Image: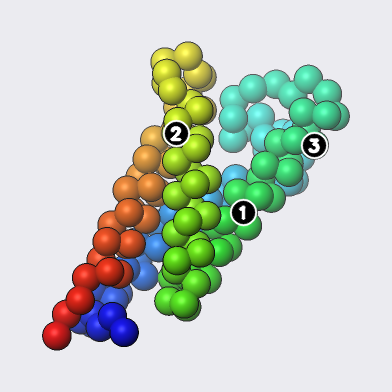
């Protein structure tokens, strides 16, 4: 069993909460086209694109909920870490080169960088043993 100090345990919780919140924010996109346009800075050209982006909001929200649960329940951290790292890492990879995207999508990119770094730190600190 991995034992950590009190401050380190609290820091790991905070580091899981950062990507949780970042991944929960797009969940507001299920409210409709107006919210999605605000989030992503693009006009939605039809019901099909709206459906896909609303579904994207739900999937990212599920990752956010899993990360939130992992902040509270350490047993969920391995699964939440894999889901978060794959979700955010894939977006970062696909969004390169960054200069080809609008301001809102660049903001999403940098938010995911912050979330990914936070999650990587949380995973690293969770694995450190303390006597």
Who comes first in sequence, dot 2 or dot 3? Answer: 3
Marks 3 and 1 sit apart, C-alpha to C-alpha, by 15 Å
Q: Are marks 3 and 1 in contact (CB under 8 Å)?
A: no
Q: Which of marks 2 and 3 is in front?
A: 2
Q: In this view, does 5 lie above or below 84?
A: below
Numbered disc 1: secondary structure: helix
Badge 3 crowding class, 10 Å Cα cut-off, few under 14, some 14 to 19, many 20 or more, is some
Image-based side of 47 in relation to 5, left or right: right
Q: In this view, does 13 lie above or below 6?
A: above
Q: Which residue is disc 3 drawn over?
A: 51
Residue 52 is situated, as x and y percent measured from the top left of the image, at 75, 35
Q: Which residue is disc 1 drawn over?
A: 61
Residue placed at 59% from the left, 30% from the top? 40
Q: Quadrant of the C terminus?
A: bottom left
Q: Which residue is disc 2 drawn over?
A: 92
Residue 20 is situated, as x and y percent measured from the top left of the image, at 48, 58
């Amino acid at each position: 069993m991995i034992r950590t100090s009190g401050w380190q345990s609290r820091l790991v919780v905070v580091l899981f909460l950062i990507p949780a919140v970042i991944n929960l924010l797009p969940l507001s996109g299920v409210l409709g086209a107006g919210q999605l346009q605000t989030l992503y800075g693009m006009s939605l050209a039809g019901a099909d694109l709206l459906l896909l982006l609303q579904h994207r909001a739900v999937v990212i929200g599920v990752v956010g909920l899993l990360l939130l649960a992992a902040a509270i329940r350490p047993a969920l951290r391995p699964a939440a870490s894999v889901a978060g790292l794959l979700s955010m890492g894939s977006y970062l990879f696909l969004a390169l080169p960054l200069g080809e995207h609008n301001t809102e999508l660049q903001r999403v990119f940098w938010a995911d960088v912050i979330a990914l770094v936070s999650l990587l730190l949380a995973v690293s600190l969770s694995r450190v043993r303390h006597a």
